[in-house]
Amino acid sequence: MTRRRGFTLIELLVVIAIIAVLIALLLPAVQSAREAARRAQCINNLKQLGLAIHNYMDSNQVMPILHGNYSNRGGPPPGGAWPLGWGASILPNLEQQPLFNAVNWSFGSDNTQENGTVARTRVNAYICPSESRQVGPWQTGTWTNYHASVGGPASVKTWSGTVLPIRSDPGNIPGQTNASPANNLGPVPLASIVDGTSNTSAFSEKLVAIGGSAIILRSSADAKRAIYGTSVNVAADTGDPTTSLALVSSCNALPGTTQSYSPSQWTGAVWHGSHAGTLHFNAYTHVNTPNKISCYAANGPGGPPGGWYDAITPTSNHAGGVNVGFCDGSVRFIKDTINMQIWWAVGTKDGGEVISSDAL
C-alpha cells in the first residue's frame, strides 16, 4: 500500500494562524511606511511654498498678501466678491506660470465666468497626501490643505502674522463696527519679521471640510474639519490674552453633543481666493494648539465662517501634530502637545518673544 502525503487539518489551521499573525504584524508597518512617505511629501510641499514666498519677496520686497481688493463684480462680502488671494499670487514661483496667466485680476475667485480656468484647476502642491478626502468641500478641484498664518490671539494683537490683507482694503465686512485697525495690516516686508524668520510661521496644514450642509458633532472624528460656536466675547488689541484664553478654554470644553456651524464648506474651499471675514478658506490663527477644534467668538467680525478674532486651528491626519512652514523656508513638525504660549509666539512676527531651540 502507498502512503498518501498531505497536511492534516490541524497543521493547515496552524499555518493559516501563522500567516494571519504575520499579516497582523506587517500591516501596521506597511501603513506606517506609507504615512511616513506621505508626511515627507507634505513637508516637501511646504518647502515649495517657503521657496515660493522667498522668490516672491525677491521680486516684490514683501510677503504675499492674504488677498487683494474686492472684485468688481458681485455684491459686497460675505455674499459675493471673494478676492483673489495669496495662493494665486505665488503661482509663478511654483512653476505655474501658465495658470497664473489665466488669472483675471479684475474679478474675484468666485467669479467663475471670468476665472473659469483657475476655478476648476487642482494644484497638487496645495494638497497634503495624507488628506483622506478626495473631493473639495465647494468646487471640485480648487480645495487646499495649506493655510497661511494671520497671527496669534486677537486679544493681544490682531493680524500679528505674516500673510495679511492689504492696508487699503482690510476686508472689513460692511456694517461691522468691530473692524480691525488698519495699522496692523500688510503687506509685510522682511524687515518687519523682527522675531526672526526661523521663529515665525508662514503656513501650516488643515483638513478640508466635508462640505454641504453637514452637521458634525463635537464627538465626531471629523470635528477637526468643522467650526463650533462659543459664547465668549474677545476684546481685541488690548495686549492682554485673557479673553482669547477664555475662548480656547470654552472651545476645548464643548460637550460632545455640540453641533458644528452649518453649512460647513468653508475650510480649505479654495486655494486661489481668500477673505478676511472667512479665514477658513485658506488661512489660520495661532490661538488653539494643533489638532484641537476650531471655534468662533460670539462677537467675531467674520461670524461663524471664522475671522480674525477666532480660533481657526491647524489640523492634519499626521499622528501627533502638524507640519508648519516657517518664514526662512524651513519646515518643522509641531506636536499637538506644544506649549500654548510657544504656539502663540510662533504666530507673531514682532511679539518680542524668546523661543528656545528645543521648545518646538
Image (cartoon, rainbow, N blue to C red):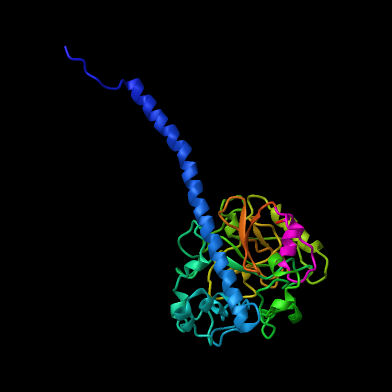
Q: Nearer the viewer, residue 301 or 58?
A: 58
Query: Where is 130 relative to 96, above or below?
Result: above
Q: Where residue 117 sits in the image (x, y, percent)?
A: 43, 78
Q: Where residue 22 sits in the image (x, y, percent)?
A: 44, 34
Asked if the stretch drawn in magenta spans residue 131, the answer is no
Residue found 79% across the figure and 65% down from its top = 353
Q: Where residue 126 sits in the image (x, y, percent)?
A: 52, 67
Q: Nearer the viewer, residue 339 or 95?
A: 95
The residue sitting at the left extreme is 1
Residue 51, can we see it? yes
Q: What type of secondary structure mainly makes up the magenta span? A: loop
Asked if the stretch drawn in magenta spans residue 351, the answer is yes
Residue 68, can we see it? no
Magenta residues, start to end: 338-359
State the image quarter where residue 230 is shown: bottom right
Q: Nearer the viewer, residue 255 or 197?
A: 197
Residue found 57% across the figure and 51% down from its top = 221
